[in-house]
Image: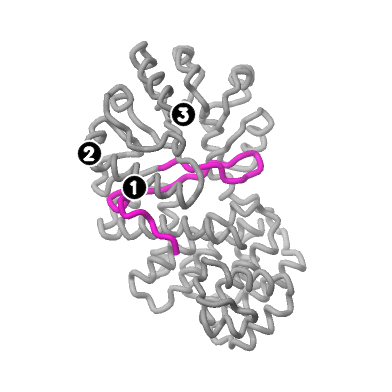
């Protein structure tokens, strides 16, 4: 599995995805805290001469090399107006100008100087304040908080921004309805939890094709299932067999030789790995959603598994299963209880998903907290647990990115 840059060890990091109109990943906003909780998502002037800034920039550079997406970072007025060297390639980042900046001629000159050096700027939480007009020649994107600012009331100003060829980012898009409205108004990029909030229709039943898939998932979750049984189940679906062998022969599995059948793959990878990949392919193949929805679940599941391994759990695969199944309603747009009626999940996994109970539940809670940037929950964790969580989540992000190339 790809590893997180060691330079980021001292930061609690989360990455909030930003999507385009087709729900394809465009980039990430980098959200972070120091492990001593002294820094909140902002690179400031005091950090400019410290190792924190250097480590962060090296880390972003290494992450971009692996993820191939730009990162959005917040830096303060002090750093923008200082003579400090910002040690990162301008093409790797978008610099967000915070919403509470006092706009002065000197500040505009500083932004112009950075812009001349190749840096791209984003106005964050723009509230249509006319005092920002002097910055627009140097602005690439404008972010609007659509949760707290009604975009319909400002449709004329939004159109004026589009007329200036600015890229509009809808921030804090919380559900599908809000996403559809912003898309209609002409926004180009979207940031928020809308992909993670399923449009669940109460009473909706699972269709026959997905029902068959869930039967397979239920069989695969059986701890006593045999190699022969797995092979027989997977072989019934030619597409599943093909995709499974494609993944098993890809770099993410790390096999030293090419395998041509499932029994052979089990010998080299083990039954647990085969079950995990068959589970992933079965769920993704029977959903009409964009792959980006699965990114959240893959990261969550892999993070849980990594934490379990670090804690020397005897069954990290159960953590992976809990991570995936905790968002099954998101994938199927059906209530969890209806799905769980058709899947024979272990009681420990069910309790973890429903109530965050047990060791599996605790690890799932940690992964979800970082996913949602619940800093209050994270702050009370011991330092060693915060570091483990951040690293597990970061490496899970890289793993998910590689996995989606093959699923």
Task: Name the residue carrying label 1.
Answer: 376
**Rendered residue at 33%/25% (across/down):** 80
**Residue 176 vs residue 348, the one in the foreground:** 176
What residue is disc 2 on?
Answer: 50
Task: Assess whether residue 7 is covered by the magenta stretch.
Answer: yes
Q: Is residue 270 above or below residue 386?
A: below
- Measuring 30% from the left and 60% from the top, which residue is drawn there? 385
Q: Quadrant of residue 83?
A: top left
Q: Is residue 260 left or right of residue 373?
A: right
Determine the secondary structure under disc 2. loop
**Residue 361 position by quadrant:** bottom left
Residue at 51% from the left image edge and 66% from the top image edge: 252
Distance in Å between CA atoms under marks 1 and 2: 26 Å
Q: Position of residue 29 (x, y in %)?
A: 45, 40
Task: Indicate which disc, 3 or 2, sits on the residue closer to the N terminus.
Answer: 2
What is the number of the mark on residue 120?
A: 3
**Mark found first going from the N terminus, 3 or 1:** 3
Part of the protein shown in magenta = 1-30
């Amino acid at each position: 599995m790809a590893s997180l840059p060691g330079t980021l060890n001292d930061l609690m990091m989360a990455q909030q995805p930003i999507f385009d109109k087709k729900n394809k990943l465009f980039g990430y906003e980098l959200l972070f805290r120091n492990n001593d909780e002294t820094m909140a998502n902002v690179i400031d002037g005091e950090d400019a001469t410290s190792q924190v800034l250097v480590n962060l920039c090296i880390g972003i550079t290494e992450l971009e090399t692996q993820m191939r997406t730009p990162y959005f970072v917040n830096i303060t007025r002090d750093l923008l107006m200082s003579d400090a060297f910002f040690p990162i390639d301008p093409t790797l980042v978008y610099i967000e100008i915070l919403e509470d900046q006092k706009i002065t001629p000197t500040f505009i000159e500083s932004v112009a100087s950075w812009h001349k050096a190749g840096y791209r700027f984003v106005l964050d939480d723009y509230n249509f304040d006319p005092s920002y007009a002097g910055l627009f020649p140097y602005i690439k994107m404008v972010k609007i908080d659509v949760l707290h600012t009604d975009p319909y009331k400002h449709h004329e100003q939004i159109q004026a921004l589009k007329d200036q060829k600015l890229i509009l980012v809808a921030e804090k898009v919380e559900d599908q309805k809000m996403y559809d409205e912003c898309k209609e108004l002409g926004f180009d990029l979207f940031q928020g939890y809308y992909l993670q909030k399923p449009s669940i229709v109460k009473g909706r039943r699972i269709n026959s094709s997905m029902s068959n898939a869930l039967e397979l998932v239920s069989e695969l979750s059986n701890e006593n299932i045999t190699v022969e049984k797995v092979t027989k189940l997977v072989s019934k679906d030619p597409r599943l067999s093909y995709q499974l062998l494609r993944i098993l022969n890809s770099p993410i599995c790390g096999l030293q030789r090419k395998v041509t059948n499932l029994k052979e793959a089990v010998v080299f990878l083990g039954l647990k790995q085969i079950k995990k990949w068959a589970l992933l392919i079965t769920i993704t193949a029977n959903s009409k959603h964009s792959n980006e929805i699965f990114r959240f679940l893959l990261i969550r599941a892999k993070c849980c598994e990594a934490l379990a391994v670090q804690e020397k759990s005897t069954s990290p695969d159960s953590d992976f299963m809990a991570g995936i199944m905790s968002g099954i309603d998101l994938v199927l747009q059906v209530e969890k209880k209806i799905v769980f009626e058709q899947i024979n999940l272990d009681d420990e996994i069910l309790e973890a998903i429903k109530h965050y109970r047990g060791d599996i539940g605790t690890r799932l809670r940690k992964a979800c907290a970082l996913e949602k940037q619940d800093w209050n929950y994270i702050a009370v964790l011991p330092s060693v647990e915060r570091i483990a969580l951040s690293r597990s989540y970061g490496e899970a992000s890289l793993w998910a990115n590689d996995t989606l190339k093959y699923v």
